[in-house]
Image (tube, grey):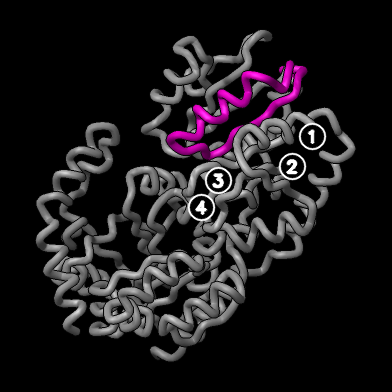
Amino acid sequence: MIWRALYTLALYALLPFVLLRLWWRGRAEPGYRRHIGERFGHYRFTPERAVLWLHAVSVGEARASAPLLRALRQEFADHDVIITCSTATGRETLEQMREESVSIAWLPYDYPGSVRRFVGHFRPRLGLLMETEIWPNLLAACEAFGVPVVLANARLSGNSARGYAKWSGLARPAFARLAAVCAQSDADAARLAALGAKQVSVCGNLKFDISPDSAQVEAGRAWRASLARPVLVLASTREGEEKLLLDALASGPPGALAVFVPRHPQRFDAVADLMGGAVKRRSRGEEPRPGDRCFLGDTMGEMAFYYGAADVAIIGGSFLPLGGQNLIEACAVGTPVVFGPSMHNFAEASALALAADAAVQVQDAAEAVRVAARLLDDPARRERMAEAGLRLRAANRGAVQKHIAVCRELLEKKR
């Protein structure tokens, strides 16, 4: 209890900086300046039916939650669903996924009064936190209101586990308050249990259950065919990586079009400047010219299009110590994958992809471009990798139903 009190005091001390950061981020992303009352537990809408609550902090978690959201609505059709998020891009992604009986809101900051107002207002029968969202005051409020909380699609790297262990006085009670944990892998399950989580089961990765938008995939393939040259997609790149990859691309592959798809939309203009002000951009409806080496994929919600267009995909977030980005989307489309050394946020999926020969891991951006160039010249190997990626996805589906079984059991206990 003392550790949570100290943590709360620290949060209050940081409140002016939290508000300043909201204002600052709102300069580039106006969404941060909207519905600010929700950040402190004040909401202007009340669902008419019993509520299930799902939290997806940002874009990756929002996309991963899509098959689970559909299954929750089908399995518990007499409930409304509240989805919360924390980032403007996450909220934009959720708005694209919005369906009937689904509401979207900000998750409040982890101040005791804010989280109590949130839980007291919506009174969810069950909460699900996607991946690694552990908020001590929020979980304490859920316990006080009798709301069971599931850590869904849970993952925890070795580095993160060691970080939590250093603050065990705060972290262990929070993990212990979880009603259940649906871990992605045996390793994740072991680390979570060691930190105090109970009722831990291995349910697999929800991202394998995501079905790519077939219309987008076909549109991407048609776009590539219209170009009549190889397409290399540099997917979900992060700040600092574009420069590394552009430098590597200076020496090849000749004739190929490199399509950059930055991870964060607020960086689209900066990446365009880095690529040269005349670079063609998809958001403007522009098409690359025959002599163009690069193209900017500056749209949201179109990863299936970009992977459909790709002969080979290089996965961003993996060339700096950032933990990587989702490679399963590419495998699900049958796109050969190359990624760098930093993939700890997708450790299980990347290991499976490497073992299946659906992906290649390299040490740096220069090697990634060299390997991609060799793959572009080797259609037989690309075909084998594509088939391996499709088999990998098919073999690892089923996480959604395992999550639903856990939710059903917890809801039955509340009757």
Give the residue displayed 53% in from the left and 64% down from the top: 68
Q: Which residue is mark 4?
A: 323
Q: Secondary structure at mark 1?
A: helix
Ranked by sequence position, the earlier of labels 2 and 1 is 2
Ranked by sequence position, the earlier of labels 4 and 1 is 4
Compared across the picture, whether 92 is left or right of 242 comes to: left
Question: Where 386 sits versus 7, above or below?
Answer: above
- Amino acid type for the residue under numbered disc 1: Leu
Q: CA distance from mark 3 to mark 4?
A: 6 Å
Badge 2 density bin: few <14, some 14–19, many ≥20, Cα 10 Å: many
Circles 3, 4 touching at the beta carbon (< 8 Å): yes
Circles 2, 1 touching at the beta carbon (< 8 Å): yes
Q: Which residue is mark 2?
A: 336
Question: Where 100 sits versus 404, above or below?
Answer: above
- Amino acid type for the residue under numbered disc 4: Gly
Percent position (x, y) of residue 105? 30, 55
Compared across the picture, whether 149 is left or right of 33 comes to: right
Q: Depth check: 16 or 3 in front?
A: 3
Residue 127 figure quarter: bottom left
Q: Secondary structure at mark 4?
A: loop
Q: CA distance from mark 4 to mark 1?
A: 24 Å
Residue 268 figure quarter: top left
